[in-house]
Image (cartoon, grey):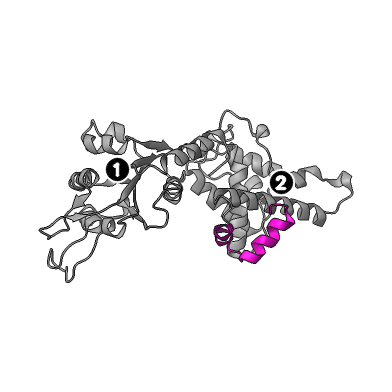
């Protein structure tokens, strides 16, 4: 997630809330990583070995959302040739993640409130209620507290959801996370596309730190993907700035105060008598070590999960960990 104080506060909140079987509202701008928080809550809960079911409420028309959430019986409507369980039934004993819950129509909000209160609902076309044991985690990029008084979101549902909430800050408010996340994405995409991870120069890191990141972490992820695919970070510095770039500092910390991840690249230069190949090799080694540690800390040093995320074999991961003194 990040090493900034703000994200460490989010991590601490996750650790406190996850073991308690309570409904959680995760809110923040698009692209900040709300789903990552939801999955972390599930992974640290007592339901970690049970289903995690995601529902993108914004991607479903209002007339289909209710049947998607609660299911339907055969003959409930034209084309219902067989019964189908809803997402709540599929998530029974586990966690259901309702992404962009602010997009649910008022009729769906009323039924959702019933499920949160009674843990019961009826499929479309059914005469009996179905009882489920589900933990609900909701996410939104809207201010539900402002929508409720306007009648655009049920106040009783808002109060039910917001009893426990976690705010994920935008990337522009935590620029110190940019080098850390960049290293993580460099290794991830290098493994995915079979490319060598290029070293990010200090000028590139400064440019990244100055960007306002309206798309937040998702936008940074796409920027690093372009760097890996093109094999160079030169275009980030020398090409015309895309729309949304701002040369003003992204936050209270100036770019110079942000630690550069490639210490090896900064510690060596022409005066050290090293050739370009050796400088690049040292920078890549430092980047690999930093990214390995980032992923291992992210998965709480679960080596199997780290190997899966890095898309390498378990044996390769162990060799790399030993090489960088992480064993």
Relative horizontal placement of residue 241, taking residue 12 as reference (left or right): right
Is residue 106 covered in magenta?
A: no
Mark 1–mark 2 distance (CA, rounded to whole Å) = 41 Å
Residue bearing the label numbered 1:
102
Lateral position of residue 306 relative to residue 122, left or right: right
Q: Secondary structure at mark 2?
A: loop
Mark closest to the chain's N terminus, 1 or 2: 1
Q: How many marks?
A: 2
Q: Position of residue 38 (x, y in %)?
A: 41, 47
Q: Say the numbered circle drawn on residue 262.
A: 2
Which residue range is magenta in the image?
303-327
Q: Quadrant of residue 86?
A: bottom left
Residue extending furthest toward the bottom: 81
Q: Residue 177: image x %, image y %?
A: 58, 40
Residue 23 drawn above or below residue 55: above
Query: Quarter of the image containing the C terminus?
Result: bottom right
Question: In the rendering, at what x and y percent does residue 245 appear?
Answer: 54, 40
Q: Secondary structure at mark 1?
A: helix
Answer yes or no: is residue 242 visible. yes
């Amino acid at each position: 997630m990040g090493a900034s104080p703000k994200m460490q506060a989010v991590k601490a909140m996750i650790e406190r809330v996850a073991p308690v079987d309570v409904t959680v509202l995760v809110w923040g701008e698009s692209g900040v990583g709300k789903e990552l928080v939801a999955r972390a809550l599930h992974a640290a809960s007592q339901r970690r070995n049970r289903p995690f079911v995601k529902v993108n409420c914004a991607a479903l028309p209002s007339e289909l959302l209710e049947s998607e959430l609660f299911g339907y019986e055969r003959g409930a409507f034209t084309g219902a040739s067989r019964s189908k369980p809803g997402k709540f039934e599929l998530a029974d004993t586990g966690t259901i993640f309702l992404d962009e819950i602010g997009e649910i129509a008022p009729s769906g909000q009323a039924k959702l409130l019933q499920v949160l209160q009674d843990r019961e609902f009826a499929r479309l076309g059914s005469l009996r209620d179905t009882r489920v044991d589900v933990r609900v985690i909701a996410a939104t990029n809207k201010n539900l507290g402002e929508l409720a008084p306007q009648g655009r979101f049920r106040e009783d549902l808002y109060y039910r959801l917001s009893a426990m909430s976690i705010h994920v800050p935008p990337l522009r408010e935590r620029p110190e996370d940019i080098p850390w996340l960049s290293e993580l994405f460099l290794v991830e995409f290098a493994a995915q596309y079979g490319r060598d991870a290029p070293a990010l120069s200090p000028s590139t890191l400064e440019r990244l730190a100055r960007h306002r990141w309206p798309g937040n972490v998702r936008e940074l992820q796409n920027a690093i993907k372009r760097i890996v695919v093109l094999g160079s970070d030169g275009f980030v510095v020398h090409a015309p700035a895309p729309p949304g770039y701002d040369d003003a500092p992204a936050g209270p910390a100036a770019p110079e105060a942000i630690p550069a991840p490639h210490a090896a690249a900064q510690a060596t230069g022409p005066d050290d008598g090293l050739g370009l190949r050796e400088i690049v090799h040292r920078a890549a080694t430092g980047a690999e070590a930093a990214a390995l540690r980032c992923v291992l800390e992210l998965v709480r040093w679960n080596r199997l999960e780290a190997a899966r995320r890095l898309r390498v074999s378990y044996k390769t991961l162990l060799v790399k960990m030993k090489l960088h003194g992480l064993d």
